[in-house]
Structures are given as C-alpha cells and as structure tokens.
Image (cartoon, helix red, strand yellow):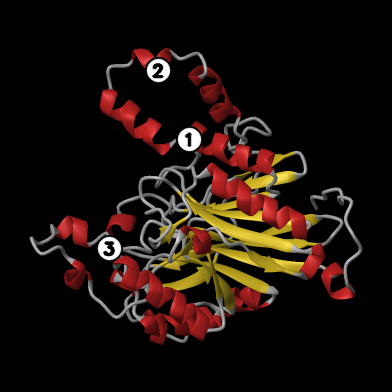
Amino acid sequence: MIRAKRENMEKDTDKDMNETSLIFTGDIGFDKYMDGKWEDENLLSPEILDFLRSADHVIANVEGPLLDASPSGLSSPAGMAQGTAQLLHTMNPAAVKVLKAMRADIWNICNNHIMDAGEKGLAATIRQAQEAGASTIGAGMNIYEAREPKILREAGGIGLFGVGYQRGCKPAGEEKGGCLNWNDMESIQHSINLIRSKCRWCIIVAHAGEEFTSLPSPYTRDRYLQYLRMGADIVVAHHPHVPMNYELAGEKAIFYSLGNFIFDTDYQRAQYNTERGILLKLRLSPEGWSFEPFGIRIDRQNERIVKEAVQHFANPRRSGRVEGEALDFKIITEIAAEEAKGDWKQSRLEKVKKYILDQM
C-alpha cells in the first residue's frame, strides 16, 4: 500500500472522511469490430463487471462523440480519404447501455476523437451523460466548462479534471467547444488551485503520450512530473492504446497508460499489445491511498472483454534481466539526461524535431 501524509485541513463531515474507491478505464470505442456490441450482454465478463461495480465511482474514457452519425456523414464536402475516415470514432448513443452497466458515473471526454463530429457531437455527448446521470470532465462548450473539475466529497474531498495532448485534442476557447489542452498551464494551474482549496486529493486524467509504445517519451514524463509539482497528487493516463507501467514520485504517482478497454479496429490490430489493458482502482482516504490493477484482454475471436493476468505493474524480475530493471524507467531517464545536453539540435531530421517540439 502506498500512503501519503495528510495535509493540514479543516475537519470535514463524517461522509467526507470515509474511504472511497475509484476505477479508471482505458479507451472505449464502439465502432468497427465493436459496432453493435452494446447489445451483447456478455460483452464484459462477470469478473470485470464485478470489479467495476466494486468501486464507488467509475471514470470511463469515452473515446468519441455519442451521436447518431456515420463517419461518411462527417466527411468534408470535397470528400475524405478512406484511410482518414477510419480514424473517425463516433458512437451510437445506444452504447450508453454499456456505460450504465459499468456504473460509469464520470466520463472523461477529453481525447482526440471527441470532436470528430464537431461541436454538435460534443454537445450531444454531454447531453447523453447528463441523461445517464453521469458527469463529464476534460471538455466542454467553452474553456471554462472544459477546465471545470468534478468534486467528490469522499475521502476528505477529491477533485478530478482531464487534459489532452496538443496536436490531437482540439482546444476549447472562450466561445468554442473543445478540450482542456495539456499545455494550457494557466488553466491547469487554475483547476489544481481550485481543487486544492476544497479537497485533500487532486487527480488529473490525461489523454496523451505516443501511441503503441511501451514506455513514455521523455517530454511526456516531464509534463506529468510538472503536474505533480504544480499540486496534483496522481496522474492517470490513456491514449497510447497499449498498457504501460507506473512511476512513484515520493507520495505521488503517474500511471502512464491503461491501454485499451473496449476498442478494436484494423489499425489497432496492426500493432502489438493493443488487445490488452488495465482497469485501475484507487482507494483513497484522508490519510493515504493505494491502488489495485486489474488486467483485461479483448478476445478478438468473440469480440468480448475478459479478465487476464496483469501484464504490467508487476514482475520486478523478468527473464534475462536483473531485479528492478523491468520497465522501471532507468532507460528512459538516461535518455532524458542525454536530451538536456542539446545534441539533438544538430540533427538534420527537421520534421522529426518539429513534431516532437510541437507536443511541448
């Protein structure tokens, strides 16, 4: 169990002092091979449903708008290439049936697909959440809605909000719907400060990182560590579509990627480990916190989600490696140290450099 010291704070009500549990999911989408699977009562195995229902709150990453529209209907007037169209992820509103079965009462809608149907799709998704009795975080019809945290009164107070990576998550504006951008540090600090003024715990749900990679890039790691320095306690991330490990920073933590949950497309199948994911349970009290990982696998033969032994968050010793070397960031931190020397500036790969710098 990981414990964090209790900060000085005014005594709360008995309800506020209770321990609570939160479960976070990886990416959820209901197109391509998952199309229509909301009608399959066996889509989620009994073990998974039992685990989800064991939590007080479930935070689901809803990877796209809930709107009755097909990708072809969203094409530009000039037409859209087939390769581009397959990257649009709208969901039939009937998929809410699964979110309800999961008891997902908080939807993270800050991701690179929530605007695939424009502001109309975003507004429809927020409306669907409200009708389902769920709250949304990370996106809204303006920047003020996008950065507004969800406040839970349990465990001395918990505040959650979502952020999304710069290139893919279309940012909200004063009068424009969209996401809270992960590099909008002023808004992020505002949300953190608001949470810290009311709550014991601050959790950031991040949709960022390089897709299909087993370790985070140095700039992603640096950004998440910066959030912790700004006042967040825990960062829980998705978007890479594959599970990654976690990192402890004193009494705080970063969970770099939960992988996929309900998500299966041809471009996913072309990559390793996209059929695996993690459900992350956090247990919080005013005195400390702990976590429990639950491994899942997409059974692609039957298109169902089943329990699997956790492939990450474990195995301090792996075959052919010394103890403690398994994905413990020794490699990535050395790369980050090399970056600080500035040798990369001499590279002639201008497009690669621009791509990386644009993320920051």
Q: Which amino acid does label 3 sit on?
A: Leu
Residue type, numbered disc 2: Trp
Q: Residue at x 39, y 73 (%)?
A: 123
Would residue 267 be found to the left or right of residue 188 on screen? left
* Front residue (pair 193, 7): 193
The residue that label 2 is drawn on is 344
- The relative height of residue 344 versus residue 102 in the rendered view (above or below) is above
The residues tagged by marks 3 and 1 sit, at their Cα atoms, a distance apart of 25 Å
**Disc 2 to disc 3, C-alpha distance:** 34 Å
> Alpha carbon of mark 2 to alpha carbon of mark 1: how far?
15 Å
Residues tagged 3 and 1 counted as in contact (Cβ below 8 A) = no
Percent x, y for residue 139? 47, 62
Residue extending farthest to the left is: 78
Check contact, mark 2 vs mark 3: CB within 8 A.
no
Q: Which of marks 2 and 3 is nearer the N terminus?
A: 3
Residue 248 placed where, x, y %?
Answer: 70, 41
